[in-house]
Image (tube, rainbow, N blue to C red):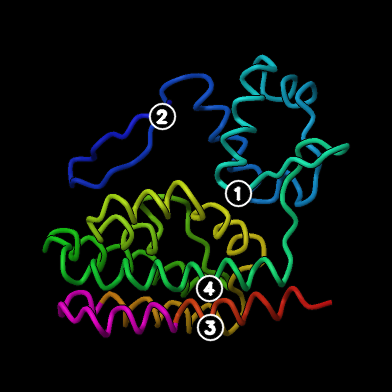
Amino acid sequence: MTQLAKKSKGTPVVEAVTSADKTFITLRTDIVEGRILAGAKLSEAELSTKYGVSRAVIREAISRLMACHLVERKANVGARVVTLSPEGLIELYQVRESLEGMAARLAAQNMTSEQITDLQSLLDVHAQGVKDSQSYYQEAGDVDFHYRIIIGSHNSQLITLLTEGIYHLVRMYRVQLGMAGPRVTTAFAEHQHIAQAIANRDAELAEILMRRHITYSRQNIEHKLKP
């Protein structure tokens, strides 16, 4: 099992504490970032050799990845990475819009002053990256704007639903098909407006802006998925 640790600033992060945890996290990262392609079949024997662990460890990792909706198992096919589709994206982003909208509302109500300051500081770091790049890539976890807001909701049920449910599937869409060109600067500006609403403790506006932001992101990625 993974273990939740606390950073000095109070933000929970998941630390790998066993070989199984490390393998799961590495395999998940390889899938999310496209090193293992969408639709690829997952062979326990091949992955065991690649990651230098037993097939039992790989089997456990695959089971956990199924719970994250990154892997599916089908009769006569076995386990494979999920395939991105416009239909799946629409369903995913409908759920994400609702849940992350709620997270933004709760973050405006519940984030500590220190967490809000840290969120603003994170955007200052992102600003330099956006300025110097044609893409807006964020690592998973504490350096991800959306993750900070989810944690800032201080609602354990919502945090579990998002971080242990659809979070990494969403990242798979965002990382592999994500923001480039004009969407880079507009998405960053949307993040700034959401953060300002949270800082102002305007819960209603924070939810509206987050919902709108996710809708725009869905439309952007949906366009890229069209044949």
Label located before the other in sequence (1 or 4): 1
For residue 153, the mark is none
Residue 202 spot, x, y in % from top left: 19, 82
Please report the residue visible at 61 percent of the width from the left and 56 percent of the height from the top: 172
Q: Residue furthest top?
A: 54
Q: CA distance from mark 4 to mark 2?
A: 29 Å
Could you say which is closer to the camera, residue 62 or residue 9? 62
Q: Residue furthest right?
A: 76
Please report the residue visible at 55 percent of the width from the left and 46 percent of the height from the top: 68
Q: Is residue 203 above or below residue 155?
A: below
4 or 2: mark nearer the eye: 4
The residue that disc 4 covers is 94
Q: Amino acid at mark 3?
A: Tyr
Label located before the other in sequence (1 or 2): 2
The residue that disc 3 covers is 216
The picture quadrant where one finds residue 208 is: bottom left
For residue 2, the mark is 2
Label located before the other in sequence (4 or 2): 2
4 or 3: mark nearer the eye: 4
Please report the residue visible at 79 percent of the width from the left and 21 percent of the height from the top: 45
The picture quadrant where one finds residue 41 is: top right
Q: CA distance from mark 3 to mark 2?
A: 34 Å
Q: Does the magenta run of residues contain 92?
A: no
1 or 2: mark nearer the eye: 1
Left or right, 119 with reference to 220: left
Q: Residue furthest front?
A: 75
1 or 3: mark nearer the eye: 1
Range shown magenta: 196-212
Label located before the other in sequence (3 or 2): 2
Q: Does the magenta run of residues contain 202?
A: yes
Label located before the other in sequence (1 or 3): 1
